[in-house]
């Protein structure tokens, strides 16, 4: 049986992970205030790759050799989970308050489970379908600021659409990773996906590399990039999978519902963003729906 101190540390990490991920919205907002979404994504994952490789060698003695199928699978994961997701994520933060983006990303498990149901034929109970509907209503309240009429009047802007595209990219990354990867640890798979995604970002950014100058990296920018790459990617990833190993996936996944809560709180405290009533109401409804969906 685990000592009380060890169990407390496990749950401490489980709370710290969504707090760290919530802070990535603020750090990302700072990065895209200087860089384009493409260059911001490249800078973030340049740091993240280095941190993930250090974690792989420290925890798993390096990276395993891949089969031809695994090379293809990790390329697809890098395309979806690193290249596409980060471009959409950064483009959304360029246009949206970080707090609103954090609430929209609450749809992540809902979209993942819905795609699994329609594409892979996975069955959902009535209770989970009800959770999907409730979560969508909550996010619609956040997106429209409580004015549902704006949906029909094209009131949803590019920022919201980019955030929804980011969530969908991550949902596909999750589903494909679950189905096609075997024989790889989560850390090894993430390393390879990060390397592929960073390569794609670099190739796309070649014509724009001259836009990056040393003068752009002041203390605030360096702290934000390190936070995104080391904290929000490598450290949070390692802690999350430590929690899954010790406490189980179902327990760990429930704590992911805290990401939008921390995201909004940190955005309001650090960036001084307004906390609208529609965000409070819609966010609470969305998280309630997500909780229904996440529970088996």
Image (spheres, grey):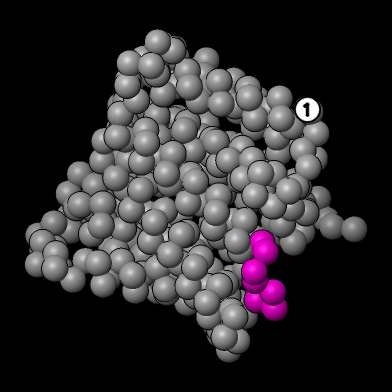
Image point (47%, 59%), residue name: 81
Image point (14%, 64%), residue name: 208
Residue 134 in picture, x, y percent from top left: 63, 22
- Compared across the picture, whether 237 is left or right of 75 comes to right
Residue 111 in picture, x, y percent from top left: 58, 40
Q: Quadrant of the C terminus?
A: top right
**For this rendering, which residue is in front, 248 or 116?**
116
The correct choice, above or below, for 70 with respect to 135 in the image is: below
Image point (78%, 42%), residue name: 123
Asked if residue 29 is among those painted magenta in the image, a careful observer would answer no
Asked whether residue 111 appears in the rendered view, the answer is yes
- Compared across the picture, whether 180 is left or right of 279 comes to right
- Compared across the picture, whether 55 is left or right of 96 comes to right
The correct choice, above or below, for 71 with respect to 27 in the image is: below
User: What range of the chain is rendered magenta?
Assistant: 178-185
* Count of numbered circles in the view: 1
Asked whether residue 256 appears in the rendered view, the answer is no
Residue 260 in picture, x, y percent from top left: 51, 34
- The residue that disc 1 covers is 127
The correct choice, above or below, for 171 with respect to 42 in the image is: above
Image point (65%, 76%), residue name: 184
**For this rendering, which residue is in front, 87 or 278?**
87
Would you say the magenta stretch is mainly helix, strand or loop? loop
Q: Quadrant of the N terminus?
A: bottom right
**For this rendering, which residue is in front, 98 or 128?**
128
Asked if residue 181 is among those painted magenta in the image, a careful observer would answer yes
**Disc 1: CA contacts within 10 A as few (<14), some (14-19) or many (>=20):** few
Residue 69 in picture, x, y percent from top left: 59, 80
Q: Secondary structure at mark 1?
A: helix
Quadrant of the rendered image containing residue 142: top left
């Amino acid at each position: 049986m685990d000592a009380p101190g060890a169990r407390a540390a496990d749950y401490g990490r489980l709370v710290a992970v969504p707090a760290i991920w919530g802070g990535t919205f603020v750090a990302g907002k700072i990065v895209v205030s200087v860089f384009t979404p493409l260059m911001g994504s490249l800078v973030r994952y340049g740091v993240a790759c280095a941190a993930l490789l250090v974690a792989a060698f420290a925890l798993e003695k390096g990276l395993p050799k891949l089969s031809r199928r695994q090379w293809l699978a990790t390329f697809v994961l890098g395309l979806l989970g690193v290249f596409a997701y980060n471009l959409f994520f950064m483009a959304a933060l360029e246009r949206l308050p970080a707090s609103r983006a954090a609430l929209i990303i609450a749809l992540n498990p809902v979209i993942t489970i819905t795609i699994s149901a329609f594409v892979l034929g996975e069955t959902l109970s009535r209770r989970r379908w009800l959770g999907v509907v409730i979560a969508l209503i909550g996010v619609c309240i956040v997106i429209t600021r409580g004015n549902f009429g704006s949906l029909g009047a094209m009131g949803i802007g590019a920022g919201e659409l980019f955030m929804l595209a980011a969530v969908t990219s991550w949902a596909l990354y999750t589903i494909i990773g679950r189905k096609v990867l075997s024989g790889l640890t989560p850390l090894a798979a993430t390393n390879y996906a990060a390397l592929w995604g960073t390569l794609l970002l670099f190739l796309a950014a070649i014509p724009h590399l001259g836009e990056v100058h040393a003068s752009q990296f002041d203390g605030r920018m360096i702290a934000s990039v390190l936070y995104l790459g080391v904290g929000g990617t490598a450290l949070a990833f390692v802690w999350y999978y430590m929690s899954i190993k010790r406490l189980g996936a179902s327990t760990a996944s429930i704590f992911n519902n805290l990401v939008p809560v921390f995201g909004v709180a940190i955005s309001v405290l650090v960036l001084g963003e307004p906390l609208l009533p529609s965000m409070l109401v819609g966010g609470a409804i969305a998280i309630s729906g997500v909780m229904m969906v996440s529970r088996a």
